[in-house]
Image (spheres, grey):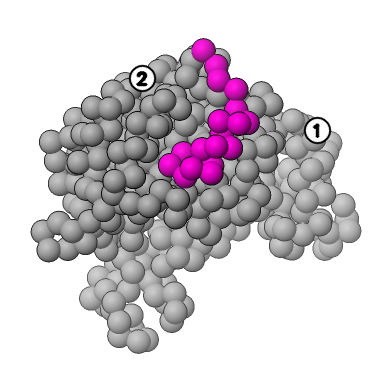
Amino acid sequence: MTFFADLHIHSAYSRATSKDMHIDTIARYAKLKGIKLIGTGDFTHPLWLDELKKELSPTNNNLFTLNDTYFLLTTEVSNVYPKNGKFKKIHNIIFAPSFTAVQKINSFLSKYGNLEEDGRPTLSLPPAVMTKNIIDLVPDALIVPAHMWTPWFSIFGSHSGFDSVEECFEDTTQNIFALETGLSSDPPMNCNLSALDRFALISNSDAHSPANIGRESNCFDCELSYSEIINVIKSKDKNKFKFTIEFFPEEGKYHWDGHRNCKIRMSPEEAIKNNNICPNCKRKITIGVLHRITALSDRVAPPTDNRIPCKHLIPLAEIIADVLGIGKNTKGVSSAYDKLVNHFETEYNCLLEVSESELVKVTTPQIAHSICNVRIGKVNILPGYDGEYGTIKVVSDLPNPTSPLLW
């Protein structure tokens, strides 16, 4: 069966996360978005783990269900540790097949940090040591470096990361099969590095609130089974791993370089010309994802035949807000969103499948046309930088409505 999977989210027990991120709300929003399978996130946190055990029903295939939404046991951990005289800060996602496996993993991880402190615990534990021990304990677990280019907390991060997977995972690199692109990069950008060719590139929302579920995801055509999904990721089987859903990477909040406090936004070329110094305060700027990828790239025109395809989308509420000229959390946007999703069943159906002629029967011509323009990449974006999301505008060939009241 073909389905969408968002395999990296957080619960209400993680810092800076909505208190609405409880299991019933997560299941409801996943269904609304069109996500059939979603990661639980945060299985290391004892209170969240109790909620998962109480609310989820096990399947025969090492997944879990609630209200026709499937769940896969996942967590994200922050590995913070010294190496070669520097502190490294690497975020990793862990996939597990059962609560028994989770208990083994948690028992090991608890030796290196307080699992009760945060849904994404900080561990004084090198990823190589963690990977070896987890795979020994749970051979069918999967470890995936999270949002791999984020400047501050990722395997390739400009401030605390490495230049290769091997530097980070050492002799356990053979157990790393996939990397998460993150919001500020996409598969085509990553294909400029030949060293990444052997890894599957997966995309997930890293949602901290229900509305952000599914902003990135993976489309699979396979059995809803833990082992099958893990095998599809490991093998990069293009017949079963159909494509990923991506942000336009420019919209990600670390795509370009810059200094947020001074409102300085720079392309990599501008940053290099300025010696990576803020022209306003003369301090070092934050080196973004595009700059970092460019620095490590070893080819300009990589082959695409073996790459899992991707599709770039803008969340439906953002498109509606842009067309109406109002905030995405306003009543006008909510009304327009609900009308579309109630009629076409899921947000992904609206964004990916429904024709413009069908959309216009339910919404304004401007919104319908903008949805279809996003599908072909007809957008203008002011890139994000230093923790600020990019500003994205849909290019429309139709005049905008003068007021939301035209609804």
User: What SS does tag 2 mark?
Assistant: helix
Disc marking residue 231: 2
In the rendered structure, does residue 229 fall within the stretch colored magenta? Answer: no
The quadrant in which the N terminus is found is top right
Residue furthest to the left in view is: 84
Which badge, 2 or 1, comes first in the chain's sequence? 2
Q: Is residue 111 left or right of residue 73?
A: left
User: In the rendered image, which quarter is residue 385 located in?
Assistant: bottom left
- Residue at 69 percent across and 26 percent down: it is 67
| Residue 227 image position (x, y, % from top left) | 40, 18
In the picture, measured across the screen, residue 185 lies left or right of residue 365, that is left
Which mark, residue 193? none
| Label 1 secondary element | helix
In the image: residue 398, left or right of residue 70: right
Up-down relation of residue 328 to residue 305 (above or below): below
Extent of the magenta region: 43-60
Residue 192 placement (x, y as % from top left): 26, 44
Residue pictured at 44% horizontal, 55% vertical: 117
Asked if residue 217 shows in the view, the reply is no
Label 2 packing within 10 angstroms: few (<14), some (14-19), many (20+):
some
What amino acid is found at the position of numbered circle 2 in the picture?
A: Asn
| Mark carried by residue 343 | 1
Magenta region includes residue 45:
yes
Q: Position of residue 303 (x, y in %)?
A: 27, 33
- Give amino acid for label 1: His
Tell me what residue is drawn at x 26 percent, y 53 percent. Answer: 124
Label 2 vs label 1: CA separation?
A: 36 Å
Disc 2 versus disc 1: nearer the observer: 2
Q: How many C-alpha atoms fall within 10 Å of the one at disc 1: few (<14), some, or many (≥20)?
A: few
Identify the residue at image location x=48%, y=42%.
46
